[in-house]
Structure formats: C-alpha cells, structure tokens
Image (spheres, grey):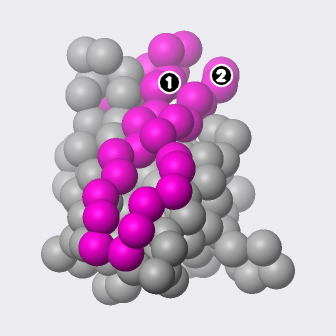
Amino acid sequence: VQLQASGGGLVQAGGSLRLSCAAPELSFSSYGMGWFRQVPGKEREFVAAFSWSGTTYYADSVKGRFTISRDNAKNTMALQMNSLKPEDTAVYYCAADLDLLMRVQKGDYGMDYWGKGTLVTVSS
C-alpha cells in the first residue's frame, strides 16, 4: 500500500497551501488518517488527523489555521493550511493506521503506512 502526498511548496508567511494524500490501494474508510511533519534534526510531530469514524483532531499549534478533510469515495485526504508561519516549515507526511489516534495519544508513531514527505517552506 502506498500513500502519495503532494502539494508542498514555497509560500510567504500568511499565505496558504493545500496538501493532498492519495491512498488508492487502501480500505480508506476503515483507517484513521493523519498528517505529521518533521524538521531536520527534530522529532516527527503530529499535525492533524481523522479517526476512522471521522472525528478530527489538531495539534494546538495549528488549530484554527489548518483544516483536515477526507473523501472516502476517492480515497483521498487533504490538509488546507492557512495563515502559514515560518515555524510551519517542515516535511509533511501523511499516514494511515487502524488505531492512528490511539497511537498519537501514546506518542507511538509506528503507523501502518506512511507516505513520502512533501516539503513546505514558509518564508518570513
């Protein structure tokens, strides 16, 4: 199973980007799906996620600025990022796991599937 993340790029502070994650081979509606990010030299951190039932969760640092969405019919997930800040600069990864939110709550990032990252750079 491959997750395909896309949509990263360079944007000025205050701007917006929309990331997408496609999972054509996944039983999408059965999985929790989420976005994570990582800055070189730092640990990967949670950004936003859906439980398999559709409940959404956000890291405090992105609440009110980022919106996660999913389309089970198309096996896709998106992350709309508004009011971007330089500290949002990172490689963003999408992930899928049957118990994704539980793993996040435990600090366990051993997800079933990870996509290749997409780089988001926010200039000041």
Q: Is residue 79 visible?
A: no
| Helix, strand or loop status at disc 2 | loop
Query: Image quarter for residue 67?
Result: bottom left
Residue at 32% across / 85% down in the picture?
60
Q: Nearer the viewer, residue 3 or 124?
A: 124
Q: Quadrant of the N terminus?
A: top right
Q: Residue furthest right?
A: 41
Up-down: is 113 above or below 8?
above
Residue at 49% across / 70% down in the picture?
122
Up-down: is 28 above or below 82?
above
Which residue in the protein does label 1 denote? 23
Question: Is residue 80 left or right of 118 when viewed as pictured?
Answer: left
Q: Which mark is on residue 1?
A: 2
Give residue 63's position: percent from left, percent from top: 24, 77
Residue at 78% across / 73% down in the picture?
40
Give residue 114's position: percent from left, percent from top: 65, 43
Residue at 17% across / 75% down in the picture?
64
Q: Nearer the viewer, residue 32 or 61?
A: 61
The stretch of residues the image draws in magenta is 1-30
